[in-house]
Image (tube, grey):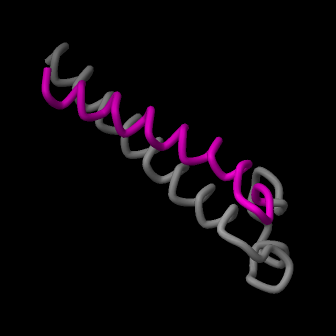
Amino acid sequence: PRLNMFAYWLYLFGSLIVVAGFLTPQGAADFGWFAYAPLNDAVRSPGIGADMWIMGLAFSGFGTILGSVNFITTII
């Protein structure tokens, strides 16, 4: 139960961080969903919106991975 709870909170906070990137003064990340390399450097995508997008995506990804580990452990 603790792993599932931790996975849920990681997923939730990761999603909230991504959405909070829209509230930054410079706006959200503007390099698209794929974070194309020439567009995601500091020159073309300044501000904290891109950093929040990357951090939120990592948190949500870790939450999803931990949730799947919990699910597989329950089955086995």
Q: Residue furthest bottom?
A: 43
For the point 48% across and 43% down, the residue is: 14
Please count the marks in the image: 0
Q: Residue furthest top?
A: 75
Q: The N terminus is located in which quarter? A: top left
Q: Magenta includes 19?
A: yes
For the point 44% across and 32% down, the residue is: 12
Q: Quadrant of residue 19?
A: top right
Q: Nearer the viewer, residue 40 or 15?
A: 15
Residue 32 versus residue 26 in the image, above or below: above
Q: Quadrant of residue 26?
A: bottom right
For the point 36% across and 39% down, the residue is: 10
Whether residue 72 sits left or right of residue 1 in the image: it is right
Q: The C terminus is located in which quarter? A: top left
Q: What secondary structure is the stretch in magenta mostly built from?
A: helix
For the point 79% across and 58% down, the residue is: 27
Q: Position of residue 44 (x, y in %)?
A: 86, 78
Q: Quadrant of residue 41?
A: bottom right
Q: Position of residue 52 (x, y in %)?
A: 59, 59
Magenta stretch bounds: 1-29
Whether residue 6 sits left or right of residue 28 in the image: it is left
Q: Nearer the viewer, residue 56 or 24?
A: 24
Q: Nearer the viewer, residue 28 or 65?
A: 28
Q: Magenta includes 12?
A: yes
Residue 21 versus residue 47 in the image, above or below: above
Q: Nearer the viewer, residue 18 or 25?
A: 25
